Amino acid sequence: MKKSLQLQADMAEEFGACVFDVTLDCEDGAPAGAEEEQAHRVAALANAELAAADTRPGSVVRRIGARLHPVDHAFFSSDVDIVLGQAAAALAYIMVPKVESLADVNLAVAAIDAAAAGRRLSAMPLHVLIESPAAVHQVFDIARHPRVESVSFGLMDFVSSHGGAIPSSAMGVRNAADAHALDQFHHPLVVRAKLEIASACHAAGKVPSHCVVTEFRDAQALEQAARTAAGALGYTRMWSIHPDQIRPILKAFSPTEAEVELACTIVVEAERQEWAPISVQGKLHDRASYRYFWQVLERAHQTGCTLPDAVRGYFSRALH
């Protein structure tokens, strides 16, 4: 966790933006029997980062969250009491795993709000993990909840929840020379779940976050997976499980230099024409395409791309 936080700080300084979140893990971050100690550790790390940020006026605001146990787990309540009770002000969001229904979201919100009362100026956003076929069935209702900020897909638990009906190959990424293995991008049930989550998020204006790639030593597999998640499945973020994965994921989710240049040309000219329709390279553009190309610029900024001078001023650094 400390290495992840340091890497986040280093890359925020490098890019002038917080290009990835760090989620401190209470659920899987410690062995059985050490759950409360892990919750205290998470709270202490979050508070230490907040205190350090207060000594660096003008630095980039960094996003740190915490993943708790599921709402029906024996240690959910203690996670909430410790992490929110001690570090609510230091956290940008709380992640709740194994969410099965809208009722689970409401239970989590009630517990978090009670523990954070008086310790935050605004309501704590939730990131939720969808990890079963039942949860996929409910994902549109879950994504619409006003406190849900992002929905992630939990691949391993999703495959396991099918009782062996989905092969273990669906937990991974097949070799480039293998055109037949049903991996996570080719098994129909897994792909359907990913598409449902992405669609639900876009319908509700939330952030869909793609699952991990466990083959973290295979750079080619990771890059292809990230490009497929972003380009074919509609995901706008992706989980990493190793520091070496972060830069390839950012690259895959970034617009190309040519896309950024075109977006810059269109947005600048549209503003100059007070958002009336314009022609660029023989194509008509109006407010529908302006919105799209503005989003290209936003994505470029969020992933650390160098923006042209003409639009760099649109994105001032977020300050403490």
Image (cartoon, rainbow, N blue to C red):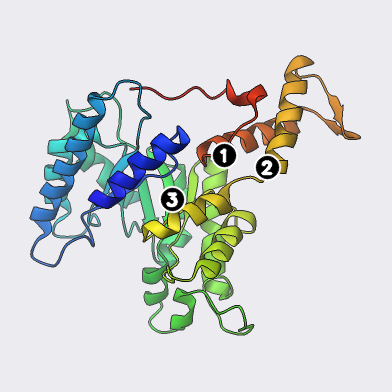
Rendered residue at 12%/67% (across/down): 32
In the rendered image, the vertical position of residue 213 relative to residue 201, given as above or below: below
Of the numbered discs 3 and 2, the one sitting upstream in the chain is: 3
Residue 244 location (% of width, % of height): 41, 59
> For mark 1, what is the residue?
305
**At label 2, which amino acid type do we have?**
Glu
Is label 2 in a helix, a strand or a loop?
helix
Q: Quadrant of residue 227?
A: bottom right
> For mark 3, what is the residue?
151
Residue 109 location (% of width, % of height): 27, 41
Rendered residue at 29%/43% (across/down): 65
Of the numbered discs 1 and 3, the one sitting upstream in the chain is: 3
In the rendered image, the vertical position of residue 241 relative to residue 159, given as above or below: above
Residue 50 location (% of width, % of height): 22, 32
Q: Nearer the viewer, mark 3 or mark 2?
A: 2
Is label 1 in a helix, a strand or a loop?
loop
For label 3, the crowd category at 10 Å Cα-Cα, with few meaning under 14, some 14 to 19 and many 20 or more, is many
Is label 3 in a helix, a strand or a loop?
strand
- Determine which of the numbered discs, if any, sits on residue 187 in the image: none
Side of 290 relative to 185 (left or right): right
Kindly report the distance in space between the C-alpha atoms of the residues bearing marks 3 and 2. 29 Å
Do labels 1 and 3 touch, CB within 8 Å?
Answer: no
Kindly report the distance in space between the C-alpha atoms of the residues bearing marks 2 and 1. 8 Å
Is residue 146 visible in this depiction of the protein? Answer: no
- Determine which of the numbered discs, if any, sits on residue 257 in the image: 2
Residue closer to the observer: 131 or 223 = 223
Rendered residue at 30%/41% (across/down): 64
Q: Quadrant of residue 145?
A: top left
Residue 294 location (% of width, % of height): 65, 31
